[in-house]
Image (spheres, rainbow, N blue to C red):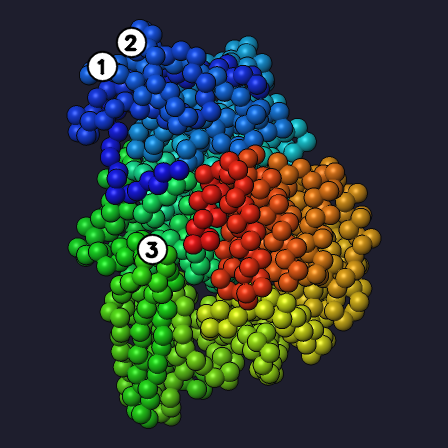
Amino acid sequence: HEKIFLSDYKAFPWKVDRVDLTFKLSPKATRVLSRIAFRPDPAAPAAPFFLHGESVRLISAAIDGEPVSPDVTDRGLTCDVPDRPFLWEAEVEISPEENTALEGLYMSNGIFSTQCEAEGFRRITFYPDRPDVLARFRVRIESDLPVLLSNGNPVASGKGFAEWDDPWPKPAYLFALVAGDLQPVRDTFTTRSGREVDLAIWVRKGDEHKCAWGLESLKASMKWDEETYGREYQLDIFNIVAVSDFNAGAMENTGLNIFNSALVLASPETATDAEFERIEGVIAHEYFHNWTGNRVTCRDWFQLSLKEGLTVYRDQQFTSDMRSAPVKRIEDALLLRARQFREDGGPLAHPVRPESFVEINNFYTLTVYEKGAEVVGMLKRLVGDNAWRAGCDLYFERHDGEAVTIEDWLAAFADTMGRDLEQFKRWYSQAGTPRLSVKEDWDGQTYKLTLTQSTPPTPGQSDKLPLVIPVAIGLLHPDGAEIVGTTMVEMSQETEVLTYDIADLCKRQGKDVARPVPSLLRGFSAPVIVEFERPTEENAFLLAHDTDPFNRWEAGRNLSREVLLKRAAGEEADDAHLVKGISSVLRDTHLDPAFKALVLGLPSEDDIAQGLHAAGKTPDPTAIHAAGEALRDRIAEELEPLLAKTFDENQVPGPYSPDAAAAGKRSLANRCLGLLSRRDDGARAAAQYDSADNMTLSLAALSALLNIGKGDAQLADFETKWRDDPLVMDKWFSLQVASAAPEDAATTADRLTGHPAFNWKNPNRFRSVFSPLANANPAGFHDPSGKAYELMADWLIRLDPVNPSIAARGSTAFDTWERYDTGRQEKMRAALQRILDTPNLSRDTREMVSRILG
Ligand code: B3K
Ligand code: ZN
């Protein structure tokens, strides 16, 4: 399997003027006829004529009407072509029904559907399947199915056929086709220039009542992009299709987004608040790609973060605006630290713009997406709001209709600002999570902060250079007031010293001169780890007084983290400050319930393992789990009356609404419920389960019960009630694995794979068991027996030939093996080796497992 390098990029030697495709759909033998107008591109370096093609059977090919016999391999074809514009025609056969990899054209539940990003179009027909080849597509679909959709505008239809024309040149990865018995749920949106756009979400019969939220979210996104970025939608139609077998979350094909049904369908009875928020965010994300990704696309797949990091950043901004900005920032930091820091600190670490890959699907990572979004956010903080908008405008204006690079993106800002961004660009090329160590000096008058940055070595990158890091800092007086408001320090050297004349500042503000308390990296202004030893009292002080909501939450987090890190390492830890801090937060009537709920959440077990490993200790997942359980018991015991009061006060009366205020209250009440169940034997949870009229309440109640070893009756009831709703059943599977006792986790997962509804070829269902095993139950995954490792390896080996990209993704469960004790290490390595030794292992999984093993 060959490695592809960024440095080897060469333009395609032909331009494509038009693509005409005819699909004669049939589950086992679909015929695809292509007519492609090629024209030599004198600006590109000459190379043999090569078209990608995989799992496609060539029936015939012709150039300008004359039959030709190309050389076909399992990766594509080469052919002698004339040195002038010519028409390429080919007929191929593909089998959507046998396509279990779910890339290219495949069948899901009787629906023909496509997924072409990144390299799926080559499974449909022979084509220069690369993002820098843009063309106008016209598509004819022949089939007896009632609904036949593709990109762009419908231009003709009749009995057994439909034709679509997409006037916007696009790369093949944005091609889409859907055919099936689907129902539309329709709406309209009027753009700011007064054009009416027809919107529709297409679903299977019976799911129509789950589309309202998706449509609301779509209209809100279209409006937001006009107001915030001045970006209007250009086509007359915007279609979304829900499909039940889908590898990713969703796909931004021009005018025809295709969604994993889990990320578009929602009703109060079947989806939780968190899912409503996620759906809103993903609908927005895919819509925002219309400008950042589709109209301005990537030159090659190494530039993936150009569209993904930027679009994630935009969807984060959207959610901040629709909901609560501080809460969203905390949620994003939680995800980044839990998943991206883990990736960046292990064998899979890679830069936001990788330099090589074997299988591009393996690079749709937390680093490309989430760290990429952080880099975009830092750029905005560095250039300021006005230059940000001006730079974005310039980027769109310059590059609309083009396939560009991260250099082009940065140039738009460099040119707007007249500022050099070369050093900033290192964020795209340097892997690893930077450390920012902070030292203080106080002489009674002057306060000095010394900031030192360093980035640890990562695979293939031993030496790191200093980055440009925006560090937002504030200083508090011990009386609780701020003496220096938030200041953005632009760090670019390895070490920076900041000096504050505190005596003068205090005098001018009429305060006693006193050593200040620093509030560092406010708003999580950069994706770095701050290394700063703070006395417990100071964290308690910041939890009570910091004016920056992120750091207020962070201070509480530091308190619980300190307790858990110590106890998980077998040391004593006093939790009095933590308990008192939580109690004050819960009593504070000015705080948002959603924020309180986040303060009540303890750091995840993986977060503690990460922290112990970083401190040079060997994490014991069993001990980490026990420490967390004991701390929850303690908090519940110490604060029972307050938790009960908070629970009662945050009940939301009336019909369900997914808005941020109501969701925040439910989130806080449900956190309280989880803790209270440890005291009331599940009485409140059982009552909530019985009376719940929405999924947020029933699922939280069920989870609270399972977590205290109860809930069998409710679990059975839930199954009976929802057995015909696969999206709800996914939650039923997940919850059991997530809340199993560590020693039972593997057995529970194993038993569930024997359930008649465990359809392992469906990605959502496969993940409903194996993702919580790998991510939500670390003590279970790392149970010293090694049973979970074995089970995971067995299933990845089984899944690999069927769906390599999901199997490869699943192998990241093992990417922390280096952290653990020899016993666990050996068992994990053995499981990985067994996967690697499997005959005919896919390119996807082979690349991942080899990188994990190092
Ligand atoms: N661009 C798609 C992801 C496709 C995944 C391909 N393996 C969804 C998104 O990020 O918007
Ligand atoms: Zn995206």
User: Hey, which quadrant is residue 418 in on the image?
Assistant: bottom left
- Which is nearer the eye, 523 or 824? 824
- The residue furthest right is 713
Identify the residue under disc 2. 64
Element marked by disc 2: loop
Q: Is residue 608 visible?
A: no
Q: Disc 3 to disc 2, how far (Cα)?
A: 48 Å
Mark 1 or mark 3, whichever is nearer to me: 3
Side of 240 relative to 707 (left or right): left
Element marked by disc 1: loop
* Picture quarter with ligand 2: top left
Name the spot of residue 636 as percent of width and height, x first. Answer: 70, 73
Name the spot of residue 425 as percent of width and height, x first. Answer: 26, 55
Q: Residues within 10 Å of mark 3 (few under 14, many from 20)?
A: few
Name the spot of residue 577 as percent of width and height, x first. Answer: 57, 82
Element marked by disc 3: loop
Tell me, yes or no, whether the two marked residues, 1 and 3, touch with CB atoms within 8 Å. no
Circle 1: residue type: Pro
Name the spot of residue 826 as percent of width and height, x first. Answer: 55, 59
Tell me, yes or no, whether the two marked residues, 2 and 1, touch with CB atoms within 8 Å. yes
Identify the residue under disc 3. 460
Q: Who comes first in sequence, dot 2 or dot 1? A: 2
Mark 2 or mark 1, whichever is nearer to me: 1
Identify the residue under disc 1. 82
Q: Is residue 478 visible?
A: yes
Circle 2: residue type: Asp
- Which is nearer the eye, 638 or 485? 638
Which part of the image, by quadrant, shows the C terminus? bottom left
Side of 564 relative to 475 (left or right): right
- The residue furthest top is 66
Q: Who comes first in sequence, dot 1 or dot 3? A: 1
